[in-house]
Amino acid sequence: MGTESFRNKAVDVICQINKDGTMFPIKIRLVDEDGLIQTYMIKAYRDLSHKGTFQLPSGIIATSTIFPFECKISNFGREHTILLYYHADLHQWRMVVPENRTGLTGA
């Protein structure tokens, strides 16, 4: 892990839960730099939970109750990669955001 500092913000997520219990995010809703609520479709995702227990770049340890996803969204024609995770114990979706990143911010 580098010297970059991270925040993890609670976000609104619409997800699909399949009959076999697997899930994946479909849309996220964030507050932009102007304080307006924006909705973004997940264009692609990678389920990172198959790796077993591991450390996310922000220092959070992903366990059997934390389901991380690397997601691609697009904003004004630019593609962004974000890290979302669902914390099953808290029933909460969160997004990991580098502290110095401009543009997308959590609600």
Image (cartoon, rainbow, N blue to C red):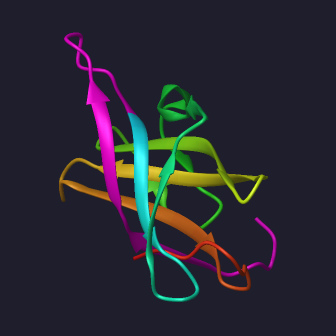
**In the image: residue 39, left or right of residue 14:** right
- The C terminus lies in which quarter of the figure? bottom left
**x and y percentages locating residue 20 in the rendered image:** 24, 10
- The one of 76 and 13 positioned closer to us in this rendering: 76
**In the image: residue 3, left or right of residue 47:** right
**In the image: residue 71, left or right of residue 15:** right
Q: Is residue 6 magenta?
A: yes
Residue 67 figure quarter: top left
**x and y percentages locating residue 98 in the rendered image:** 67, 75
Residue beneath the point at 41% across and 37% down: 26
**x and y percentages locating residue 92 in the rendered image:** 25, 58
**x and y percentages locating residue 30 in the rendered image:** 44, 68
Tag count: 0
Q: Is residue 73 magenta?
A: no
Q: In the rendered view, would you say 85 is above or below 98?
A: above
Residue 64 figure quarter: top left
**In the image: residue 44, left or right of residue 68:** right
Res. 59 in view? no
Q: Residue furthest top?
A: 20
- The N terminus lies in which quarter of the figure? bottom right
Residue beneath the point at 18% across and 59% down: 90
Span colored in magenta: 1-24
Q: In the rendered view, would you say 2 is above or below 99?
A: above
Residue beneath the point at 58% across and 86% down: 33
Residue beneath the point at 59% across and 55% down: 56
Res. 102 in view? yes
- The one of 75 and 48 positioned closer to us in this rendering: 75
